[in-house]
Amino acid sequence: MNKLQAGSTRKGVFSRDDYLAPPHIPTGQSPKDVLNVIWRKNKVFLDIGDYSIGSFVMIAWPLILLCLWLMPPFGSEAFHGMYWYAFFCFVIFPVLMLFYIMSQPAPLPTRFNRQRREVCVPQKDGSYWIVPWEQVEAQAVAVNSIGQHGKTTQGMLVIGFTNPDPGAKEENKHYSIGFSCGGGTTAMRLWECMRSFMEVSPEAVADNTGRFHRPRGVWATYIDDVIEAARRKGWFKALLWEGACGLILFNTPLIDLVERIKLSPPPDLTDPAIIEWSKPLPPEQWAKRSPELEQAIIQREADLAIEPERA
């Protein structure tokens, strides 16, 4: 990742990069876990998972429905050639991918420890990096494309870590995790979940970790979610979106099922050294912000307070 200052923006003909950290100053957006990446949260640490099997199902299911809906009659010439190629790409391949993902262990989460102001980054070889929080990099990336249906924008949040071992080999010096949440404001809101937890308080970040401990079955939970949505926005919208679209278009019961199988409970960090590192500290031992970050946050908060007045 490019080491530019937070608040910097680089625009291309079809792209936009927003640099969010360092320094870890407010983005001006409220934190929101738009992808349900928060796996655990307590007074000491926040676990963030970049394993989103539910998102895979949500994206693949409409493509499968579309391919099945467009299926031509058996025996027709259209049933051969191009259709079977599309059928493999949009039905068979996603189903095989889902079975493969389900057969593999879910990756470990990245743990943000607010009392130590450090981040534990698990590696594939079983080792861990303990990275100072203020060295973590964050960038929102958005790419525009123009086709026959108009302009579309795709983006993601990328969080980068540098190996604290000065003797690490070049191929092992950097590590990053990405979240396909869209760029711009959406990526900023997701980043604010981590930044606000570390710099504000655990209470500043809402989470949906209750979904990992649901005592009721999949269909009972689906009905409960529709009823809860009806309380918030009325029965018409709830039956239309959470009810019909959630069931038919996105198959939320299937999403709930695969998440229960793979993430109930989510994988945990079990290394004895990390367990010790994750324990709470007495308040007098908590790590403090650097003076540079303290000043940057004060300045940014002052700027954000002035912006509504200018508008």
Image: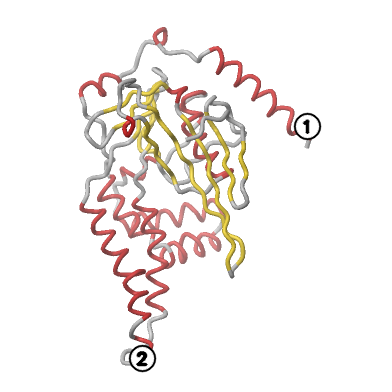
Q: Quadrant of residue 222?
A: bottom left
Give how far apart the Cα atoms at labels 1 and 2 are. 66 Å
Residue 303 left/right relative to 75: right
Badge 1 amino acid: Glu
At horizontal 44% and vertical 44% (from top left) the residue drawn is 179
Q: Residue furthest right?
A: 310
Left/right placement of residue 99 relative to residue 200 reads left
Of residues 199 and 149, the one drawn nearer to the viewer in this rendering? 149
Measured as percent of width and height from the top left, residue 229 is found at 49, 54
Residue placed under numbered mark 1 in the picture:
309
Residue 28 locus on image (x, y percent): 62, 33
Q: Which residue reaches farthest front?
A: 170
Q: Residue at x 61, y 32 (%)?
A: 7
Q: Which mark is residue 255?
A: none
Q: Residue furthest top?
A: 284
Percent position of residue 260, x then y: 28, 50
Please state if 236 lies on the left or on the right of 223 as rendered: right
Please tell me which of labels 1 and 2 falls first in the chain: 2
- Judge the density around disc 1: few (<14), some (14-19), many (≥20) Cα neighbours within 10 Å: few
